[in-house]
Amino acid sequence: MVGIIIASHGEFAKGIKQSGSMIFGEQEDVQAVTLMPDMGPDDLKAKLEEAVATFKDQDQVLFLVDLWGGTPFNQVNGLFEAHKDKWAVVAGLNLPMLIEAYASRLSMESAQEIAAHIIETAKEGVKVRPESLQPKEAKAAAPADTSANAGRPGSFDYVLARIDSRLLHGQVATAWSKSVTPTRIIVVSDAVAKDDLRTQLIQQAAPVGVKAHVVPVDQMIKLAKDDKHFGGQRALLLFETPQDALRAIEGGVPLKELNVGSMAHSVGKVQPNKVLAFDQNDIDTFKKLEDKGVKFDVRKVPTDSKDNMDAILNKAQDEINKNK
């Protein structure tokens, strides 16, 4: 695996590394190296060398630095000279760049290949609202659907169905989208479909090249029964609640597995782990889904280990019983 070193003035490198972990999960062979006010160039160089030494494969190292020409870049560049046939350095670090680098390590084995690949994503991550302020040369139509099967007869390919009270957010738009490569993200929710603002924000949050839609549960059921004009479309479904997912499945949406990512805490709910909260209705709903043969994939991002849903539900039930 390509090792990644994030280097910056001050604590920026540590902060963006933490942000990347929140979105894409904890990563192996990633080190944050910071230049602090009491440090000199030689001190920073020593820290960079120590960071490289921690990697399993020291032949393939990618440096992501904050500023071209700054001290972190200059010290990285000095080390790079002896390895320029394999190592790579990219300046202008932003969060889209870092996440794309993480995703690229899943399929690319060369630091230089990853470096060339992440530049465009870093640029696309810089946007402005109102859109009228965007430089004219940067405005472009949404990429056309280039799926090999687009427009051909067929039906939806359901690449992921997820329960997540936050719906379309960073972990979905980046980590999961990179993992399952949908062409459509469909939020299935009666409540959100009635909310024009939330619908607009979801559509704006879609990754580049992916179309986002918001539909009521009944509409999703109709689409699932008559989806022949969606041939070649890879659908990622997002449900706000397990109850919506159960309605959809009972209505005929052919889902065999649900990824359970996040269920927000509210009054009357117990929280058996950090990201999932349940009331009795939630527990009963998951039991009904289980009775229908639905499997549960409990994890926030693809790189997380899967949790045991039965154990989580049993713990939630115990806590509810204690509170009675």
Image (spheres, rainbow, N blue to C red):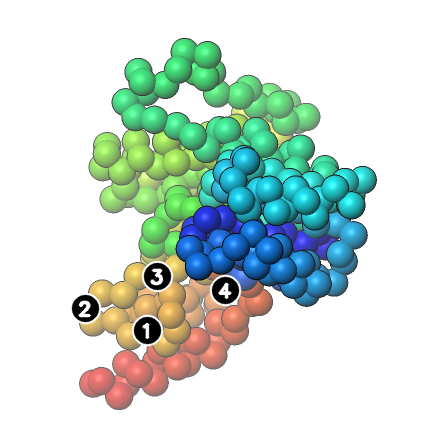
Label located before the other in sequence (1 or 3): 3
Instruction: List the residue tagged with mark 2.
Output: 267
Q: How many marks?
A: 4
Callout 2 crowding tier (Cα within 10 Å): few <14, some 14–19, many ≥20: few
Label located before the other in sequence (4 or 2): 2
In the rendered structure, the answer to whether residue 247 lies left or right of residue 298 reads: left
Is residue 39 something one can see in this rendering? yes
Please tell me which residue is depicted at 42% across the width and 70% down the height of the picture: 287
Residue type at numbered disc 4: Val
Please tell me which residue is depicted at 78% across the width and 52% down the height of the picture: 59
Instruction: List the residue tagged with mark 1.
Output: 271
Label located before the other in sequence (1 or 4): 1
- In this rendering, the answer to whether 159 lies above or below 209 is below
Label located before the other in sequence (4 or 3): 3
In the rendered structure, the answer to whether residue 258 lies left or right of residue 89 reads: left
Please tell me which residue is depicted at 60% across the width and 55% down the height of the picture: 42
In the rendered structure, the answer to whether residue 215 lies left or right of residue 52 reads: left
The residue tagged with tag 1: helix, strand or loop? loop
Residue type at numbered disc 2: Val
Please tell me which residue is depicted at 70% across the width and 48% down the height of the picture: 79
Instruction: List the residue tagged with mark 3.
Output: 263
- How far is mark 4 from mark 2, CA to CA? 23 Å
The residue tagged with tag 4: helix, strand or loop? strand
Identify the mark at residue 298; answer none if there is no mark: 4
Callout 1 crowding tier (Cα within 10 Å): few <14, some 14–19, many ≥20: some
Callout 4 crowding tier (Cα within 10 Å): few <14, some 14–19, many ≥20: many
Callout 3 crowding tier (Cα within 10 Å): few <14, some 14–19, many ≥20: many
Residue 76 spot, x, y in % from top left? 63, 46
